[in-house]
């Protein structure tokens, strides 16, 4: 029996993709044609688009911390959501981005959005970062508790998905953690490297090392597995 395939289009929103977006990732718009071909594919049975979906007081915004700068400043983030405040990690700070219901949070109008079956809104709990569409940075699965609107693992299992292809923005953050979590959840997971762009382009090599360890396969647009989806 043929595998059932899902596509996850990560955070292709105005703030990350448009040159005038507040956290614009270089080259992001170049991914649009390939992403649209994947959205149009009849071989992919379930198509998910994710949105970073932050309240204005989100912990990852430098503007919410006195004396901190976007990109270069870090804070200590605690696992309040998981009820383990002693568990802490370093959190990089960003410009305000993808604030709920603002222009910056909208998915690009250039995308074939009519083909999307499910929209995941993530990062809605102001206390914690959520790069992955599956769980927050501490691994808490917060569907129904304010962090994210759906349990993506459950949604993919409902559809009997075997294979997951991940594209979108940014390769070194939300694509990275979403793909690693998809593999962890037991899906055969691929990242199509031509369909992503990174905040720091030179970080991609390290990201790929992490993918090898995490059981994620990196493929190029020209490889057979991808071409067979685009026929
Ligand atoms: Zn964010």
Image (cartoon, rainbow, N blue to C red):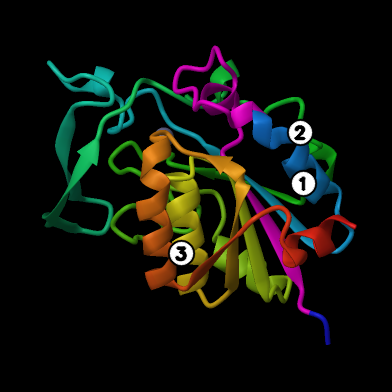
Frontmost residue, 132 versus 37: 37
Which of the marked residues, 2 or 1, is nearer the chain's N terminus?
2
User: With respect to residue 71, does 200 lie above or below?
Assistant: below
Residue matched to label 1:
116
Direction from residue 180 to residue 84 in the image, left or right: left
Which of the marked residues, 3 or 2, is nearer the chain's N terminus?
2
Q: Which mark is residue 111?
A: 2
Q: Residue at x 46, y 17 (%)?
A: 22
The local crowd at label 3, few if under 14, some if 14 to 19, many if 20 or more residues have their Cα within 10 Å, is many
Q: Is residue 216 at least partly visible in the picture?
A: yes
The local crowd at label 2, few if under 14, some if 14 to 19, many if 20 or more residues have their Cα within 10 Å, is some
Q: CA distance from mark 3 to mark 1?
A: 21 Å
Frontmost residue, 75 versus 208: 208
Secondary structure under tag 3 reads helix
**Residue furthest front as drawn:** 222
| Magenta range | 3-29
Residue matched to label 3:
181
Q: Find out whether the residues at labels 3 and 1 contact each other: C-beta distance under 8 Å.
A: no
Q: Position of residue 224 (x, y in %)?
A: 76, 66
Direction from residue 134 to residue 3 in the image, left or right: right
Q: CA distance from mark 2 to mark 1?
A: 10 Å
Secondary structure under tag 2 reads loop
């Amino acid at each position: 029996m043929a595998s059932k395939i899902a596509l996850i289009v990560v955070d292709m929103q105005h703030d990350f993709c448009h040159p005038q977006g507040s956290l614009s990732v270089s080259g992001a718009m170049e991914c649009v044609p390939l992403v649209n071909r994947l959205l149009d594919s009849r071989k992919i049975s379930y198509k998910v688009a994710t949105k970073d979906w932050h309240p204005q007081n989100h912990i990852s915004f430098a503007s919410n911390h006195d004396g901190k700068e976007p990109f270069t400043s870090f804070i200590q983030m605690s696992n309040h959501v998981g009820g383990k405040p002693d568990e802490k990690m370093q959190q990089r700070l960003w410009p305000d981005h993808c604030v709920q219901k603002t222009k910056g949070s909208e998915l690009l109008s250039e995308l074939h959005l009519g083909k999307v079956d499910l929209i995941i809104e993530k990062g809605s709990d102001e206390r914690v970062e959520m790069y992955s569409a599956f769980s927050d940075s501490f691994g808490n699965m917060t569907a129904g508790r304010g962090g994210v609107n759906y349990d993506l693992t459950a949604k993919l299992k409902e559809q009997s998905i075997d294979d997951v292809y991940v594209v979108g923005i940014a390769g070194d953050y939300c694509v990275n953690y979403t793909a690693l979590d998809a593999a962890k959840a037991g899906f055969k997971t691929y990242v199509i490297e031509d369909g992503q762009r990174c905040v720091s382009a030179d970080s991609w090599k390290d990201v790929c090392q992490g993918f090898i360890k995490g059981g994620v396969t990196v493929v190029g647009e020209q490889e057979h597995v991808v071409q067979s989806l685009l026929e």
